[in-house]
Each structure stands twice: as structure tokens, then as C-alpha cells.
Image (tube, helix red, strand yellow):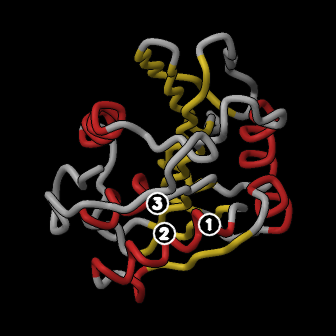
Amino acid sequence: MRVTTGKFKGRTLRTVQGLSVRPATDRVRQTIFNVLAHRMVLDGCRVLDLFAGSGSLGIEALSRGAAHATFVEADGGAVGYLEANLEMLGATADATVLQMDAIHFLRQSSEPFDLIFADPPYAYDATTEIPQEVFSRSLLTGDGFLIIEHARPLQFASSAAWTIGPVKQFGRTVVTFFTRNTLP
């Protein structure tokens, strides 16, 4: 897996082999960042990468100008690869790596982020709780995006707190973008 654009373009990221971690494919990552390029400025933004795995989404954001990325990953093996990737890129000063459950992190966090990625395992039972945790705790800045990569059967609906869209499909993988609703 390679970083697609920015200051780390072309650099290869190491990842855990097997099904314990399912990294976002190059095509999915490129689509996510193409959508974001028309909707927000990545330069200087603060990023949260939940279920980070090898860190491909947060590292891609750092490569494109994000100021800082917080990576949350429960699997110790994946954390080792993530830390090695950040060190190889010289990006450790721009990152915080936490080994813990993503929902637990959201429930204890109070720091707002401009961009939040969540790429949970498809079998993760609490995926539908992520938007509620993010928006009820105001963890997303006003113009920010929450982006969840999930399996196709799962669908999200807009609510009083957030709006859905766009939604991108890649076979059985779906990427859903969320934005915060603002008061009139």
C-alpha cells in the first residue's frame, strides 16, 4: 500500500497481514480525498483516525498538509506497524498513537477534530454508534467531516445533529460522509 499524494507520495506503508486489519484500498482512499479536496482545506487541520490499522488514512491526510493526526487502534500488532510507518516517514512529531478501543476513546475525548476517519472491521457491532458519539460530544468542528467506511448492508440516515452525503460505493464497501448540521 502506497501513499497516493503529497509529501509522502509513493512511500510504501507496512500493514498487518491477514484479516485482523482491512486497510482502505488505494481506490477508496483516493476517492475520499478527491471528495474532500472540493469541500475542505486539509492544510493545518487536525485529524482523528479511528480503527487506524496501518494508519493509511491519517498518514494520507498528513501527506496532504494536515497539521496533526491522532491514531486510535486497539490491536497491538497493528499499532507496531503504525508506529513504524510514522517513524519511517519522519512524521512522529505530527502524530499521537493510542492503543485503545475507538468507542472508548470517543466517550472520553473532548478535543474537536476537523476530519474524523472511522474504518471499523465489518463485523464491529458498534459501528452505528460512531456518529452519535462524535456529534453528541461535539468532536467535529463546524466545517469538518466524519467519514465511515463500512460494509454495504449497513446504511445511515441523517438526523437533527448530522447530514449524510455523499455516499460512495465500491463493491461491498461503502464510504459515508457526515457533516454537522448548523442552526439557522
Q: Residues at badges 2 and 1 in contact (C-beta under 8 Å)?
A: yes
Above or below, 179 relative to 65: above
The residue wearing badge 2 is 81
> Mark 2: few, some, or many residues within 10 Å (few <14, many ≥20)?
some
Q: Residues within 10 Å of mark 1 (few under 14, many from 20)?
A: some
Mark 3 burial class by Cα count in 10 Å: few <14, some 14-19, many 20+: many
Q: Nearer the viewer, mark 3 or mark 2?
A: 2
Q: Give the CA distance from mark 1 to mark 3.
A: 12 Å
Give the percent coordinates (x, y) of residue 91: 34, 81
Q: SS at mark 3? A: loop
* Total tally of numbered discs in the picture: 3
Residue at 56% x, 56% y: name it.
52
- Foreground pick, 56 / 45: 56
User: Where is residue 163, by image quadrant?
Assistant: top right
Give coordinates of residue 152: x percent, y percent: 59, 14
Give the residue at mark 1: 77
The C terminus lies in quadrant: top right
- Looking at marks 1 and 3 on the same chain, the residue that comes earlier in the sequence is marked by 3
How far apart are labels 2 and 1 at the CA level? Answer: 7 Å
- Cα separation between marks 3 and 2: 9 Å
Relative placement, left or right, of 128 versus 153 is right
Residue beneath the point at 14% across and 58% down:
10
Task: Tell me the tag on residue 183.
Answer: none
**Contact flag, marks 3 and 2 (Cβ < 8 Å):** yes
Please identify the quarter of the rendering in which residue 121 is found. Answer: top right
Q: Is residue 6 left or right of residue 89?
A: left
User: Which residue is nearer to you in this view: 91 or 36?
Assistant: 91
* Residue kind at label 3, given as amino acid type: Gly
Comes first in the chain, label 3 or label 2: 3
| Badge 2 element | helix
Please tell me the numbered disc located at residue 55: 3
